[in-house]
Every structure is written in C-alpha cells, then in structure tokens.
Image (cartoon, grey):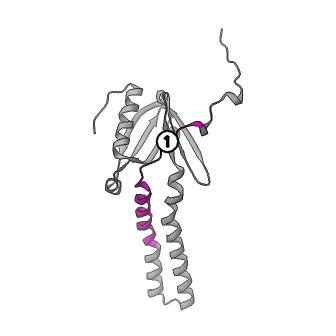
Amino acid sequence: MFQNPEIALEDLPGMEDLAWQNLHPDFVRRMQVEHALIALAPLAGVAVLSVLLHIPLLQTVLLWALAIGFAIVFVSWPRISVPRRGYVVRDKDIVFRSGVIWQSVTAIPYNRIQHVETSNTPLDRKFDVATLQLFTAGGSGGDLKIDGLGAEVAEQLRIYILGKVGVSIETA
C-alpha cells in the first residue's frame, strides 16, 4: 500500500550546512575586464555627444560624471556578486547559489540531466575559466549554467556528472 508520511520541517537539511565551493579566483578579474569593455560604450557615447552636439559645459560635466559613475559601479560589481556564488556536488545532485539582492539556490538531480557541456569564450580562456551547462529533462526552465569554474574543474565535473547520469563520455 502506498504511504506518504509527513516530514517535520526541522528534519529537512539546511543549506547553511553545505560545504560551498567558490568559483575560480580569476573569475572576478575576468568579469571586470568584460564589464570594462561594455562600459566603454557609454563613455564613447558621451564623448561623441559632447563633441558633435556642442553641449554646454555644465551639461557635459554632468554627462561625464554619470557615465564615469556608471562605469565605476559596473566594473566593481563582480567584486560583490562573484563571492556570493558557489556550488556543491552531492551524491544525488548538484546545487548552485547566486544573487546579491535576489538570491537563488538551484538543485539539479542527476537523474533529470540529459546533456552536459562545457564552453568558454576567448576571454574565458585568457583567465583559464569555463562554463558548465546542465540540460534537464524538464525543459529550459530547469537548466543550470555555472559560469566561472576553472577550466579543468569544469571538465572534471562534466565527466563526473555524465558518469552519474550513465551516458557515454565524450572527451573535449
């Protein structure tokens, strides 16, 4: 006969008890370089606007102050956000946490995973980091993407997870 006994809330495992693994130490710098490159666009826009439109001095100074302020905050943000990310590899699942203001914790059971891949951009390769992406049976809403792993760690995790899933392992 089917039984579904109730579990007391205090018997549930807590996330604070997990041994969270940090991302690669160079991932903060990698993100700062990417953000600096992106922040160049508003700075270039202000430069073009101030030269072509002959904007009065006070407005030009205000535009530059806004653009530089944005760039400083944008480039500094990875120092705040990256340390708040982490992952845990457990016997039956992998858990990932992220977020500064809106925090999330995602656990993906290995029996739901259909495909695992690692990828890296040229900037990732410069800093020896990679992305591990897990594709689940539940569709795109259940997928997990972990940026900022060491390239070797990402590949080791890919092989480990594929072994847990029972898929033939392809070497990169």
> Is residue 104 something one can see in this rendering?
yes
Between 160 and 52, the residue placed more toward the observer is 160
**Residue found at x 44% / y 38%:** 134
Left or right for 4, reference 89:
right
> Which amino acid type is shown beneath numbered disc 1?
Tyr
Between 165 and 115, the residue placed more toward the observer is 165
Above or below, 78 against 59 in this view is above
> Is residue 56 something one can see in this rendering?
no
SS for dot 1: strand
**Residue found at x 53% / y 67%:** 73
Name, please, the residue furthest toward the top. Answer: 1
Magenta region: 17-41
Above or below, 160 against 150 in this view is above
Between 53 and 65, the residue placed more toward the observer is 65
Left or right for 7, reference 62:
right
Kindly report the secondary structure that dominates the magenta region of the rendered protein.
helix
**Residue 143 lies in magenta, yes or no?**
no
Number of callouts: 1
**Residue 32 at x, y percent in the picture:** 44, 62
Give the residue pinned by disc 1.
Answer: 87
**Residue 43 at x, y percent in the picture:** 46, 76
Name, please, the residue furthest toward the left. Answer: 171
**Residue 30 at x, y percent in the picture:** 40, 58
**Residue 29 lies in magenta, yes or no?**
yes
**Badge 1 local density, few (<14 within 10 Å), some, or many (20+)?**
many
Quadrant of residue 44 within the rendered picture: bottom left
**Residue found at x 48% / y 87%:** 53
**Residue found at x 44% / y 57%:** 28
Left or right for 92, reference 1:
left
Q: Quadrant of the C terminus?
A: top left
**Residue 14 at x, y percent in the picture:** 63, 35
Q: Quadrant of the N terminus?
A: top right
